[in-house]
Each structure stands twice: as structure tokens, then as C-alpha cells.
Amino acid sequence: MSEKKAYFAAGCFWGVEDRFRKMPGVIDAVSGYMGGHTDNPTYREVCAGDTGHAETVEVRFDDTRISFEDLLDAFFEMHNPTTLNRQGPDFGSQYRSAVFAVDEAQSAAATRKKAELDASGRWRDPVVTEIRLGGDFWPAEEYHQRYFEKNGGGYCKT
């Protein structure tokens, strides 16, 4: 096994975490915060929009069973990457679409995939997914972890 990490922001982290967790080759998925300027942010602070963080899912995966490119495909399927700072009823920069790459190879792969999607004509509007090297990942509070498993799924909060 060769364990790697990837970080994706695609709106409310509950559903994103749940979908990644169910993919063969994914070892674990953890809800948290990334991309901001505040250390150890809380959910309340992130929702207020003052930390710069996005609700993000850390995906630990076995790259001998699933590739980063496969994770990218799933990421772009599970949300609308053309809406700036919004997914469904959730809005604000904490719900932005982002790939926080762990290295230049992930950044290059995400940039290629974004360009491929834009060229495909699948979306009428351009893909606005932010792609950049990630910083610190801050796990969300325990009640956010495996939320759908604990609470039977349902609507993402705002």
C-alpha cells in the first residue's frame, strides 16, 4: 500500500466526506478547514467568513488502488465547479470550489483537469475552482466527522 493525501473543497463538507469515504481505494476522509489565515479555526469562525478557510475534506487514499486523477474526476462530478463561493443553498467563501494540492504534481493534474473541463463544453460557465498548494489542514469539530453516518444524511447546513 502507498498512502497519499489529497484535499478538496466542494461546498458543505458532510456530503463530500461521505462520497469520498465510500470510494474503493480511499482509506479515510476527514472534514476540516483549509486555505485560510487563522490557526485552528472553529466552525463558527469559518462560517462567519473571517478566517479565509474553506470547508475541506482531507482524503487519505491508497494510490495503488485509486489515482489522484480518479479522485479529481469524482470531485468535479460531486459539485458545480462554475459557481463562485456557492454550492446549492450554501454561499460564502467557505463553500468555494478548491483543490489544495500537496505537491506540484497534484497541482499540475488539477490544472489539466480544469482546462479539460472548460474545453469540453460540459459547463456553460467557466470552471472557477481554485487550485493552489495547500497549507495547514485543521480537522473540524468531532460532531462534523462522519456526519451522514451519525445522522442519516440529509441537508447540509449553513
Image: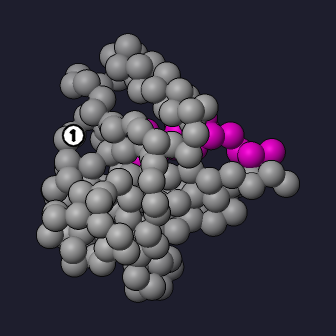
- Tell whether 55 sits left or right of 158: right
Hey, which quadrant is residue 90 in on the image?
Answer: bottom left
| Depth order, front residue of 3/136 | 136
As helix, strand or loop, the secondary structure at mark 1 comes to loop
Name the residue: 30% across, 41% down: 80
The reply, left or right, for residue 61 in relation to residue 43 is right
Relative to 16, residue 99 above or below: above
Residue depicted at 51% across the width and 43% down the height: 101
Q: Is residue 148 visible?
A: no
Residue in the foreground of this view, choosing between 157 and 42: 42
Question: Which quadrant of the rendered structure holds the C terminus?
Answer: bottom left
Q: Which residues are magenta?
A: 63-78
Q: Is residue 103 visible?
A: yes
**Residue 55 in which image quadrant:** bottom left
Screen quadrant of the N terminus: bottom right
Q: Is residue 90 rendered magenta in the image?
A: no
Q: Nearer the viewer, residue 16 or 62?
A: 62
Quarter holding residue 148? bottom left
| Image location (x, y in percent) of residue 49 | 16, 63
Circle 1 Cα neighbour tier, 10 Å, few/some/many (<14 / 14–19 / ≥20): some
Residue under circle 1?
83
Question: What is the x, y in percent for residue 53?
Answer: 29, 59
- Dominant secondary structure, magenta: helix
Relative horizontal placement of residue 22, taking residue 85 as reference (left or right)? right
Residue at left 21%, top 74%?
A: 45
